[in-house]
Image: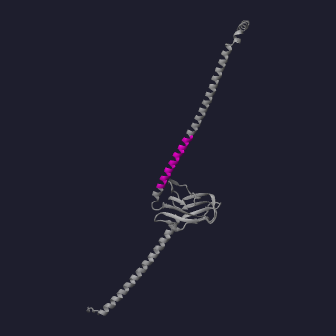
């Protein structure tokens, strides 16, 4: 085996420079690859965020007289919803005169708190929702809606802001739990509605019995008045009869009545 050739310092320096150059090229390629992956990830996140935001996006529908339609809508910008603090804030301007408006806070079941509209002429009420408390609304079904019919038509160019706190009830891996919760709330609602209906029925029966009782009391009062009138009339006839019997005429004609009685 031939002895190893000892490298000179110059050769060692040259070899180290070559290894360093190759290392720099590898690091550069790795950095470029990482950057490319980060850009792809950012694009995917942006696309995913946009898709999710379309489910949470506030949309204004305005009725010009022919009802609501997809053509007469104004979607709020994606930036109107802040996922960090669950707030929604948007400004709308009507392009045409409207007799009514509808606000759709996304497409998913959701919990909305403090729905506020800057224009005092617009009072939005939730449609098919559970009002948990003042200014707190729970929508258990998809396509939640707030409806507002304006007493006066809103002219074109009307500008107003809408703000509220928004908690979407997202469907996902816990669908079973979500639907169980929704079903439980619906059952509570059904029981509450049934109890309210039963209470209304009992109230109606009580009112009916009350009316019947009032009618019987009026009839009894009328009969008492008739009885009092009959007693008074009887007393009047008794006094009149006694007056006739005690009169001088009745006494003077007594022999005549006795004679006529014997003749019969």
Relative to 111, is 251 on the left or the right?
right
**Does the segment drawn in magenta span residue 67?**
no
* Observer able to see residue 203: yes
Relative to 7, is 58 on the left or the right?
right
Relative to 56, is 234 on the left or the right?
right
Q: Position of residue 104 (x, y in %)?
A: 55, 61
Question: Which residue is the extreme one toward the front?
Answer: 248
Relative to 160, is 253 on the left or the right?
right
* Image height of 99 relative to 46, above or below: above
Q: Residue at x 64, y 25 (%)?
A: 229
Q: Is the N terminus in the top left, top right, bottom left or bottom right quadrant?
A: bottom left
Q: Position of residue 219 (x, y in %)?
A: 61, 31
**Does the segment drawn in magenta span residue 200?**
yes
Colour style of the rendered protein structure = one colour
Q: Position of residue 52 (x, y in %)?
A: 50, 66
Q: Is the C terminus in the top left, top right, bottom left or bottom right quadrant?
A: top right
Q: Position of residue 171 (x, y in %)?
A: 48, 61
Q: Which residues are magenta?
A: 181-204
Q: Residue at x 48, y 55 (%)?
A: 182
* Image height of 252 relative to 104, above or below: above
* Observer able to see residue 264: no
Query: Residue 71, located in which quarter of the rendered image?
Result: bottom right
Question: Residue 206 versus residue 92: which sits nearer the camera?
Answer: 92
Q: Residue at x 44, y 78 (%)?
A: 35
Q: Residue at x 42, y 77 (%)?
A: 34
Secondary structure mostly seen in the magenta stretch: helix
Numbered marks: total: 0
Query: Residue 77, located in which quarter of the rendered image?
Result: bottom right
């Amino acid at each position: 085996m031939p002895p190893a050739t000892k490298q000179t310092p110059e050769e060692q320096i040259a070899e180290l420079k070559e290894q360093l150059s190759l290392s720099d090229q590898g690091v550069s390629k790795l950095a470029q690859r990482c950057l490319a992956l980060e850009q792809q990830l950012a694009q995917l996140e942006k696309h995913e965020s946009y898709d999710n935001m379309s489910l949470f996006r506030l949309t204004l529908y305005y009725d010009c007289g022919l009802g609501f339609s997809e053509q007469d809508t104004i979607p709020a910008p994606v930036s109107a919803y802040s996922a960090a603090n669950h707030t929604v804030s948007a400004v709308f301007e009507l392009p045409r005169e409207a007799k009514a408006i509808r606000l759709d806070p996304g497409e998913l079941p959701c919990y909305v708190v403090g729905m506020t509209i800057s224009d005092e002429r617009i009072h939005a009420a939730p449609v098919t929702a559970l009002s948990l408390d003042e200014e707190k609304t729970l929508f258990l079904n998809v396509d939640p809606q707030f409806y507002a019919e304006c007493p006066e038509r809103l002219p074109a160019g009307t500008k107003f802001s809408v703000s509220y706190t928004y908690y979407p009830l997202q469907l996902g891996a816990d669908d079973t739990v979500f639907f169980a919760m929704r079903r439980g709330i619906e059952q509570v609602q059904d029981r509450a509605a049934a109890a309210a209906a039963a209470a209304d029925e009992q109230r109606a029966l009580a009112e009916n019995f009350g009316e019947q009782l009032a009618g019987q009391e009026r009839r009894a009062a009328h009969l008492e008045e008739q009885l009092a009138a009959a007693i008074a009339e009887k007393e009047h006839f008794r006094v009149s009869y006694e007056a006739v019997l005690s009169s001088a005429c009745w006494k003077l004609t007594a022999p005549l009545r006795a004679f006529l009685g014997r003749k019969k």
